[in-house]
Image (spheres, rainbow, N blue to C red):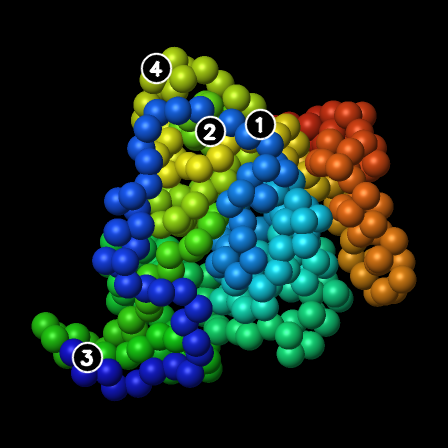
Amino acid sequence: MDVIAQGVGRIFTDPDADKAREFFRQKSRKLESKLTTVKEAVERLVKDGDYLSIGGFGANRIPAAILHEIVRQGKKNLGLAGHTATHDFQILCAGKCFNRCDIAYIVGLEARGLSPNARKYMESGEVEVSEWTNYTLSVRFKAACAGVSFHPIRNMMGTDTFKFSGAKMINCPFTGTKYALVPALFSDVAVIHVHEADIYGNCRTKGILMSDYDLARSSKKLIVTCERLIPTDEIRRDPTSTFIPYWCVDAVIEQPYGSYPGNMYAEYFSDEDHLREWLKVENDPEEFKKFLDKNIYSCKDHYEYIEKNGGMQKMLKLRQKEWLMIGARE
């Protein structure tokens, strides 16, 4: 196939599926407990310079506890998949944790507005970017999950997004139709928050999955936080509900309210007051520094962060609000 056009964006990860296969072939599939802590998982599995991908969708089911710890431990020079990213992106920008980013949806917190600090960081010149679309990044994960080095798509062609991406355009060898080819995205480490998991890493969740199925299977290392641990016998009673199998997972942490201040379907609503506070204090660098010191750097863990922002009383109110919202939709 002859390449007839290509974007100028850099590809930050190696799309070679055979190299990835070699890595996955060495990964243990032993059925053993992977229980650990947030602190230990980040220390052991997230290294400076790694390429990081984050599960969830928008502010829904984000692994906030792990992201705070990445900032708290001062991880730097990460690559990042800016895929449906909202508050998760805002957190990592606060710590200036990444220096290269595949961008699709970033800086914005949906209807809540734009993050002033994230925008400032992306305009600083400190971050190298390649442009994609949300769909395209999903397809890149899917290609990696399938064990191939690229996937053909029909979108982006004829746009500036294609121009500033790392995609290539070809004529189909069967029909002559033009397609864009996007490279597989094998992350060094992915972080996903779920509703339930057992000690081995078999995971179940509710609500929208987005690309987490493919992300879990294409990442070289996977950290899972869960709202609650459940017995493996429960997993075996309903095996079709397991959307991430244990052999994908490197660490499991039981972290109730681990997505706070984000939303967790059927568990708790997002803390909109706290998210508005984040956006407001970012306009004042000194106030923002104090805010980060209070909410991340001085906190020993996610539980202390929650305590500083209303504790269990707040969480119960957010739980009630989530069920009221679900009831209203029904």
**What percent of the width, then of the height, locates residue 314?**
79, 30
Is residue 144 among the parts visible in the rendering? yes
Q: Earlier in the sequence, mark 4 or mark 3?
A: 3
Amino acid at circle 2: Lys
Front tag of 1 and 2: 2
> In terms of secondary structure, where does tag 4 sit?
helix
Amino acid at circle 4: Arg
Q: Residue at x 87, y 53 (%)?
A: 290
Snapshot quadrant of residue 176: bottom left
Q: Is residue 168 left or right of residue 48?
A: left
Tell me the tag on residue 237: 4
Mark 3 nearby-residue class (10 Å; few <14, some 14–19, many ≥20): some
Front tag of 2 and 3: 2
Q: Earlier in the sequence, mark 1 or mark 3?
A: 3
Q: Which residue is labeled 2 in the image?
A: 34
> In terms of secondary structure, where does tag 2 sit?
loop
Q: Earlier in the sequence, mark 2 or mark 3?
A: 2
Q: Residue at x 42, y 83 (%)?
A: 8
Amino acid at circle 1: Glu
Front tag of 4 and 3: 4
In space, the residues marked 4 and 2 are separated at their CA atoms by: 21 Å
Snapshot quadrant of residue 63: top right
Tell me the tag on residue 171: 3
Mark 1 nearby-residue class (10 Å; few <14, some 14–19, many ≥20): many
Q: Earlier in the sequence, mark 1 or mark 4?
A: 4
Whether label 2 touches label 3, CB < 8 Å: no
